[in-house]
Image (cartoon, rainbow, N blue to C red):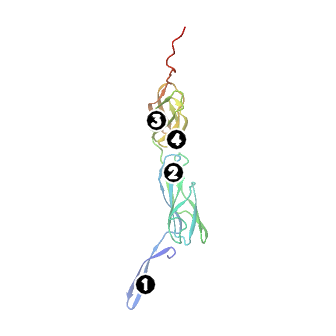
Amino acid sequence: MFGLARLAAAILVRVGALFLFMATLMAHAAAGVTITGATPSTFSGPGQTITFHFRIDQENAIINSVALTMNHPLGAVSCSPALPIQPFETTNCTATYVTQLSNNFDIVQYGTYDLTTNGGPRGGNVAGQVTVTYVPPGVPSLSSISPTSGPVTGGTSVTITGINLNDVTSVTIGGTALIGTTVVNSTTIIGTMPANTAGSKNVTVTTLTGSSTLAGGFTYLTPTITLSPTSLPPATA
């Protein structure tokens, strides 16, 4: 290696009785950490995982570890090839960010890095910049509820599925709120059925972008009364 440049080609050229050594040098990027991309490049609500990609190269020391301080908090950094790496070697690293908000904004990822090396600590600004864009979710659309029936006393655990189930503001069954509503992700909601009157009830999910209804999606059943024993012995005089 030749510092920030590498010998790419060498030619001996004869001029008269002299041989001239000609070399072509290929320049490399500056040493340090560069942010190179993000997957995915868009998000539509909280709880989504974005993977950011980084490259470490051209450091003239053995790199033992890297710490990143970005404008949004990242998880642990993972590199391949794994650290430590030898002087001037390159490794590609990833770190994840879980979206926290669902407002109309972009995650612009930039920051600083700190390296521990066999020559002492090093640091600087992360080169480059990556933007992850917020895309508002579409109008919700429900596809199913499971199970589809339960007792009028309530207590049935249900799973509601569909699309664009982000930013949920309410889930109702026949006008009564679902108990313990939990939005698992943009396609799944779970909760517990409240008590209600017998019959088929509409299942409605409302989000910041609209609402969707499964007409008669859940049926409340009246309890079946059974007698035991089913007959009595004849009366005796």
Q: Position of residue 119 (x, y in %)?
A: 60, 72
Q: Position of residue 207 (x, y in %)?
A: 50, 38
Q: Earlier in the sequence, mark 2 or mark 4?
A: 2
Q: Position of residue 140 (x, y in %)?
A: 46, 39
Give me the C-alpha separation between circle 3 and circle 1: 77 Å
Pointer 2 with pointer 4, Cβ within 8 A: no
Quadrant showing the C terminus: top right
Q: Say which residue label 2 marks.
A: 49
User: Which disc is residue 145 wearing?
Assistant: 3
- At numbered mark 3, what does the secondary structure look like: helix, strand or loop? strand
Say what amino acid the circle numbered 1 marks.
Answer: Phe
User: Which disc is residue 21 wearing?
Assistant: 1
Q: Say which residue label 4 marks.
A: 183
Q: Nearer the viewer, mark 3 or mark 1?
A: 3
Horizontal side of residue 159 vs 14, given as left or right: right
Give me the C-alpha separation between circle 2 and circle 4: 16 Å
Q: Nearer the viewer, mark 4 or mark 1?
A: 4
